[in-house]
Amino acid sequence: MAGTALESFGDFQYSTGPAYVKGANKIINDAQLNTYMLGRMLSGEHSQHLQGGSKIRDVIFLDETSTFRHYLPNESMSWENPQTLDQWETPWRFSLAHMSYTEEEVGLNNGSLTAEARFHKYKDLMMAKEMNLWTSMMNGLEADLWAAPDYTEMEASGGKAPLSIPALISEHAAARVDFLTDSGPSRGDHPGYDPIWAAAGGTTVQGIASATKTNWQNQKEAYSTAAVGAQSSGTGTHLFTAFDRMFKKLNFDAMPVKPGMAEASSHPGWIACSMLGSTQYENALRVNQDWFRDGDGQSPGYAGPNYRGIPVIYVRQLDTAALYTGDTASDGYGDETVTATNHDDDEAIGVAGARYYWGHSKYLKKVIHSQRFFHKKKPFFPSAQPYTLICPVNIWHNNIACSRLRLGIISPYVAAG
């Protein structure tokens, strides 16, 4: 009789589904995170569902080979046939979470109850199982979004981990450093490729080498202060100035003629930061009240802080993520509070302080296989455990950049002098 109870519970679980858990609302889930960037990545333009294919790939136009020229009437012409497209690709990644239940667990839980009473017992047990499964899945995918870049695991075909946002938006893409300050850094001699990859012998991101394809590098800006004043003269760049410059770099007009031959006009969709970054930005808004104020000015808090309408969002994962290093990957990695032993003031690398990731839903996506979007498999008995039922849920996916040129990061640096 206990075996029948286990099988009937499996059928109940498989046919009822996770939608039931939302309505029951009997257990408070304190394992959930404060923030989920994943919610944005699964909705709107951020999320893209693809059918089939051994890899995720697309073509991109990174470099113009100009055929424009001036000529005289009846002049002999020389014609060219430029090859302008590059292809990026990245492997599918496969992730799962599961729940399991034993014959003893189910049988002793319901005993010899009536069918109706057994149903309610099933609901209670199922809630706990489902809650752990879906919390594991959501928290795991959220951790993936902000994982430290790892070439072997993320870029190489034999890896298991999906690309993370810090792998696609790197403060090490130094060829795009360009600051406008009296004493701050300018374009430096740091390698054009991302050294965070180089530690594992890799120089490509989604199969394209950013050392030779500069338009496959993300934008980068830096700041040295968030104190009172739009620009602290002689001490470097203010946070607001860095925001101004990044916005201009990531703001694109449509082409004036044949706009269908290029991207539509666009500007960043969100700015993600840690608790340190979020509170620093909000405090900068407060201490600069002489220039602007929010609402009636009676509350020190800001409801939905933003920059030019772009939300500045807090991401809990960034509080402790070890993403930042010094001049070389051998320096090791630390969180935002750690200054690397071998940091380079002139490159804004390895300096303690908050980072700000700038993204756009059209150009930074979570790609999901159309047949494996949180796919629940019917519960089964593993061969070595005949009294245990397993129910896995899996997803085939990866995180991709369709354009790194339209993504950016603002990092801290130490002003020279």
Image (cartoon, helix red, strand yellow):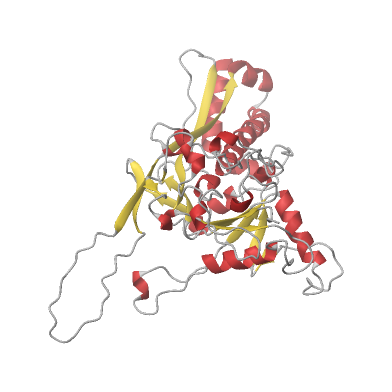
Q: Is residue 336 above or below residue 259?
A: above
Q: Is residue 347 above or below residue 120?
A: below
Left or right: residue 376 compared with residue 110: left
Which residue is drawn at the image coordinates 21% and 82% (left, top)? 71
Left or right: residue 237 compared with residue 286: left
One can see residue 403 in this view: yes
Asked where in the image residue 148 lies, by quadrant, the reply is: top right
Is 75 in front, or is 204? 75
Could you tell me residue 284's position as x and y percent?
A: 77, 62
Q: Quadrant of the N terminus?
A: top right
One can see residue 402 in this view: no
Left or right: residue 5 compared with residue 52: right
Could you tell me residue 210's position as x and y percent?
A: 42, 50
Hey, which residue is sitting farthest bottom in the picture? 73
Q: Is residue 62 above or below residue 148?
A: below
Which residue is drawn at the image coordinates 35% and 42% (left, top)? 55
